[in-house]
């Protein structure tokens, strides 16, 4: 499995993928965090779905990671795309047969791929945390938001907790991408279906009936990143989202192990 | 230690109602070059995929280097393979692609450059795979198959897309590998291509084995053809008549008569034609090539 991981990391390090993804992470992490402060007095709100996060809230110990936690869902979408593409491309390029000839244990291939992609996702999350927090620290004084509590012991604890929540959420999104890649065997189909569902279908369903956010998979994973919200508790999101990911991963693994490689 | 590199017994693969491979049996001795021939769609690639553990057989057993094909992890570290053409990551260089496979199989990465040079890609190793010509891609595929320093090399149509010079180089490479003790199992739909380098032949048609054994045995089974030409086209039918009367099948093709008869019957025909007042312009006994033998055995053409 260690060999599979090293081989996969070589593919993930290619400049177009690595630098392209990290560039997107830097841009959107900076943007999401900057908007929190730049739109703080905007009547349209400064957060997701027109919500307003006030100066008082941003000045709390948890304020420093507000931007980072709100970008978590977006990092999840990036992870979904990367995991889906890296998995499904083995079918479209026909390289899966090479992998299986050199490593016949299909579970080792799957596990090695997953671990290497998690490492990639962790790099993405760390970079996002640095950019989000740095942006917040730079912009907070310009709109009179106090950062005093951000670096208190409580603030540091919030940082760790948020980091772990974002990691769980991003890995969950990534595994869903991997499952879609294994099931659909085409990067375009897997990414299109995943993004369409998460960004459009789920948002429409939640807009029409708010209670559906308690059960939709993408909503659960986004809620995990923010540590729960007023409608859905963190533990509910963790249990429901975890169940979706586990069932999907189980079905895809069984299919991957048993399915003939005929392309 | 078994003396067969590949042995297959009653191996079948069924897709829905179609038998892609139907109860085939054959053996490939160690240290030989074995040609796996048959038209497109005859089941060659499906058979190779079953032997490499990529697809599960519907019936039958197979052994590779003495290990059952149900446990590919026991033999694949000693097998090099290129199935259904080369397949690599377009955004990586040839060298990086081989590095990925070397790391995956736990092979020394130092072999990568040596192999690139061996297949004539030493100077293009750092170029991206997507910039390679079809011939270069095939060469990279062969290099990848050689990564494990294999005891058995399985190549599916390795000369597709190569120019005549490239084809000759691949043939020479395969022969050299066999001389080093590597068993080479190589498929092609171009039967004439394998005739030159193979010691053994497995012939497949519509999923069934037509012949499996030493190539010499196949050729001796076949009657040679005597090709006779006359100065006058009208005499061709009379030559054919002489052959038929002596019990040899004859057919007029283009401007000559093709007679299925032993070589030593040629002088008898020469005399019979002379006695009949026919002047022969050409009388040439000819052994059939692999392609003609294949078509004769399968009843095609």
Image (spheres, rainbow, N blue to C red):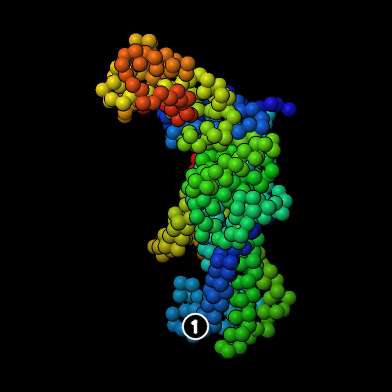
- Where's residue A32, x and y in %? 53, 75
Q: Nearer the viewer, residue A73 or A227?
A: A73
- Where's residue A35, x and y in %? 51, 80
Tell me if residue A108 can be seen. Answer: no
Q: Nearer the viewer, residue A237 or B251?
A: B251
Q: Nearer the viewer, residue A26 or B28?
A: B28
- Where's residue B221, x and y in %? 51, 19
Task: Residue B240: name its quadrant.
Answer: top left
* Chain to which mark 1 belongs: A
Say above or below: B63 vs B176: above
Say above or below: B206 vs A185: above
- Where's residue A160, x and y in %? 68, 69
Task: Residue B266: name its quadrant.
Answer: top left
Instruction: Look at 55% across and 55% down and name the residue there.
Output: B89
Instruction: Look at 61% across and 60% down and name the residue there.
Output: B123
Q: Is residue A50 left or right of residue B241?
A: right
Residue at the extreme left of the image, as rendered: B234
Disc 1: which residue: A39
Q: Nearer the viewer, residue A31 or A93?
A: A93
Instruction: Look at 53% across and 40% down and name the residue there.
Output: B156
Tag 1: Cα neighbours inside 10 Å, few (<14), some, or many (≥20)? some
Instruction: Look at 56% across and 72% down and name the residue there.
Output: A23
Q: For the residue labelled by badge 1, is the local secondary structure a helix, a strand or a loop?
A: loop
Task: Residue A86: name its quadrant.
Answer: bottom right
Tell me if residue B128 can be seen. Answer: yes
């Amino acid at each position: 499995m260690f060999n599979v991981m090293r081989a996969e990391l070589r593919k993930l390090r290619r400049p177009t993928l690595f630098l392209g993804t990290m560039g997107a992470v830097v841009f959107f992490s900076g943007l999401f965090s900057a908007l929190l402060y730049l739109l703080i007095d905007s009547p349209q709100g400064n957060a997701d779905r027109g919500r307003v996060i006030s100066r008082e809230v941003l000045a709390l110990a948890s304020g420093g990671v507000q931007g980072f936690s709100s970008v978590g869902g977006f990092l999840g979408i990036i992870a979904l795309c990367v995991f889906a593409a890296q998995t499904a491309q083995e079918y479209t390029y026909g390289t899966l047969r090479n992998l299986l000839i050199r490593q016949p244990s299909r579970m080792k291939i799957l596990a090695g791929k997953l671990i290497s992609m998690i490492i990639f996702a962790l790099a993405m999350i760390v970079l996002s945390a640095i950019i989000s927090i740095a942006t917040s620290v730079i912009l907070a004084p310009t709109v009179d938001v106090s950062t005093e509590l951000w670096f208190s012991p409580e603030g540091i604890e919030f940082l760790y907790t948020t980091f772990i929540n974002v990691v769980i959420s991003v890995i969950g999104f990534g595994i869903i991408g991997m499952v879609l890649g294994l099931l659909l065997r085409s990067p375009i189909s897997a990414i299109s279906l995943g993004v369409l569902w998460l960004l459009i279908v789920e948002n429409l369903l939640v807009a029409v009936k708010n209670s559906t956010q308690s059960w939709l998979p993408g909503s659960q994973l986004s809620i995990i990143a923010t540590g729960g919200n007023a409608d859905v508790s963190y533990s509910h999101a963790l249990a429901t989202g975890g169940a979706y990911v586990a069932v999907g991963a189980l079905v895809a693994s069984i299919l991957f192990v048993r399915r003939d490689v005929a392309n | 230690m078994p003396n067969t590199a590949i042995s297959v017994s009653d191996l079948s693969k069924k897709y829905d109602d179609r038998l892609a491979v139907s109860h085939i049996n054959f053996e490939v001795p160690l240290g030989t070059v074995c040609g796996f021939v048959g038209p497109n769609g005859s089941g060659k690639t499906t058979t190779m995929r079953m032997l490499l553990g990529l697809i599960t057989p519907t019936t039958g057993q197979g052994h590779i280097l003495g290990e059952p094909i149900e446990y590919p992890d026991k033999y694949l570290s000693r097998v090099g393979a290129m199935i259904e053409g080369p397949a690599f990551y377009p955004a990586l260089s040839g060298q990086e692609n081989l590095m990925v496979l070397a790391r995956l199989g736990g092979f020394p990465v130092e072999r990568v450059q040596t192999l690139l040079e061996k297949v004539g890609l030493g100077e293009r190793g750092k170029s991206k795979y997507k910039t390679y010509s079809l011939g270069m891609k095939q060469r990279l595929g062969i290099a990848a198959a050689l990564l494990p320093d294999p005891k058995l090399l399985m190549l599916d149509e390795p000369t597709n897309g190569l120019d005549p010079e490239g084809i000759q180089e691949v043939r020479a490479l395969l022969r050299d590998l066999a001389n080093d003790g590597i068993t080479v199992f190589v498929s092609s739909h171009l039967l004439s291509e394998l005739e030159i380098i193979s010691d053994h032949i497995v012939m497949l048609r519509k999923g069934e084995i037509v012949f499996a054994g030493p190539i010499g045995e196949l050729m001796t089974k076949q009657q040679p053809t005597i090709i006779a030409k006359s100065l006058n086209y009208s005499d061709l039918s009379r030559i054919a008549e002489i052959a038929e009367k002596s019990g040899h099948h004859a057919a007029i093709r283009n401007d000559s008569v093709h007679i299925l008869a032993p070589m030593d019957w040629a002088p008898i025909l020469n005399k019979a034609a002379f006695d009949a007042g026919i002047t022969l312009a050409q009388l040439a006994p000819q052994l059939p090539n692999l392609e003609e033998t294949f078509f004769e055995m399968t009843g095609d053409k």
